[in-house]
């Protein structure tokens, strides 16, 4: 289910009554769950219709006791309906696993409301290892939170793949952490990230900063999110100002070029190994 995060738009709970109530300053912070809210949620996600009012209120109470308001609760269950039938202790366990990342309650609630599937994470060690690795690359817990807000699929990405993309952005593109965490670049496959960057460079539309340049110094480069957080068609036509067939042709040529380099490198290594064996004999 976590892999669907990138491909399914977050379902927004659109109950007018809830939105209006939540917008009024005079309304108490704790909005009670009413039948009209349940009915509206069922319209958005029909699979919720099988659950009794008792189950709804039990789940609502669990989330409410842990600081999540009714509007957030409704958004969460319409995005991840199976949470309704989950035992309260298991919901609490999931919340506690995420609290260990130390994002702070407000930021955590924003993350879980936007991506309710993250409450399916049940491996505390794996999550803390991921959080620790990401923090080692972007310095702060808040930056880790920003990465997950933009790229929730990091939950299921291998560390080596993330490392490859981090290294490329920082060493080859010379992008700084503040710009990386504001983008969904880590969601893009490495080959696509590299291809887009090389294409811009060869068009003369991207120039890496000098190694000791001030990161706040203005640049003519597009921001990272403009390069990565867009479809191939938008990237080609709006960022590079070329046609889609032209970009497709470049992708094919680059793939051949990189394969030729890889093949030559393997051949050179083999020849080097053969020379070493001959010297030994």
Image (cartoon, rainbow, N blue to C red):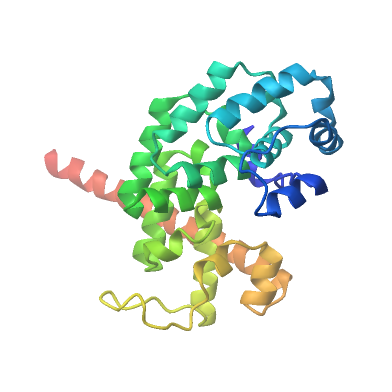
Residue 33 on image: x %, y %: 73, 32
In the image, residue 50 sits, relative to residue 119, either above or below, namely above
In the image, residue 143 sits, relative to residue 122, either above or below, namely below
The quarter of the image holding the N terminus is top right
Depth check, front residue: 191 or 60: 60
Query: In this image, 124 relative to 32: left or right?
Result: left
Residue 24 on image: x %, y %: 70, 54
Residue at figure coordinates x 40%, y 51% from the top left:
142
Q: Residue furthest left?
A: 280
Q: Is residue 143 visible?
A: yes
In the image, residue 56 sits, relative to residue 22, either above or below, namely above
In which image quadrant can residue 250 be found? Answer: bottom right
Residue at figure coordinates x 31%, y 53% from the top left:
139
Query: In this image, 281 relative to 222: left or right?
Result: left
Q: Is residue 15 visible?
A: no
Depth check, front residue: 174 or 19: 19
Depth check, front residue: 197 or 136: 136
Count the labels in the image.
0
Residue at figure coordinates x 44%, y 45% from the top left:
161
The quarter of the image holding the C terminus is top left
Residue 269 on image: x %, y %: 30, 49
Residue 215 on image: x %, y %: 34, 75
In the image, residue 52 sits, relative to residue 262, either above or below, namely above
């Amino acid at each position: 289910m976590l892999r669907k995060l990138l491909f399914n738009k977050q379902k927004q709970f659109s109950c007018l009554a809830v939105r209006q109530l939540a917008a009024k300053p005079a309304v108490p912070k704790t909005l009670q769950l009413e039948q009209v809210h349940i009915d509206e949620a069922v319209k958005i996600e029909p699979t919720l219709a099988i659950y009794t009012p008792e189950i709804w209120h039990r789940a609502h109470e669990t989330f409410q006791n842990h600081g999540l308001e009714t509007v957030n609760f409704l958004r969460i269950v319409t995005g991840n309906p199976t949470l309704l039938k989950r035992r309260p202790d298991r919901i609490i366990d999931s919340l506690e696993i995420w609290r260990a990342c130390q994002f702070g309650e407000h930021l955590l609630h924003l993350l879980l409301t936007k991506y309710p599937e993250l409450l399916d994470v049940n491996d505390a060690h794996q999550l803390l290892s991921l959080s620790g690795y990401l923090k080692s690359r972007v310095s702060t817990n808040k930056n880790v939170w920003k990465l997950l807000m933009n790229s929730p699929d990091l939950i299921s990405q291998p560390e080596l793949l993330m490392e490859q993309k981090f290294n490329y952005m920082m060493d080859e593109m010379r992008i700084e952490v503040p710009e990386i965490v504001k983008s969904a670049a880590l969601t893009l496959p490495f080959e696509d990230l590299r291809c887009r960057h090389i294409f811009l460079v060869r068009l003369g539309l991207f120039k890496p900063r000098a190694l000791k340049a001030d990161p706040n110094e203005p640049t003519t480069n597009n921001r990272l999110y403009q390069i990565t957080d867009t479809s191939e068609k938008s990237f080609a036509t709006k960022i590079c100002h070329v046609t889609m067939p032209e970009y497709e042709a470049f992708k094919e040529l680059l793939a051949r070029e990189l394969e030729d380099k890889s093949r030559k490198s393997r051949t050179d290594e083999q020849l080097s190994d053969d020379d070493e064996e001959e010297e030994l004999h």
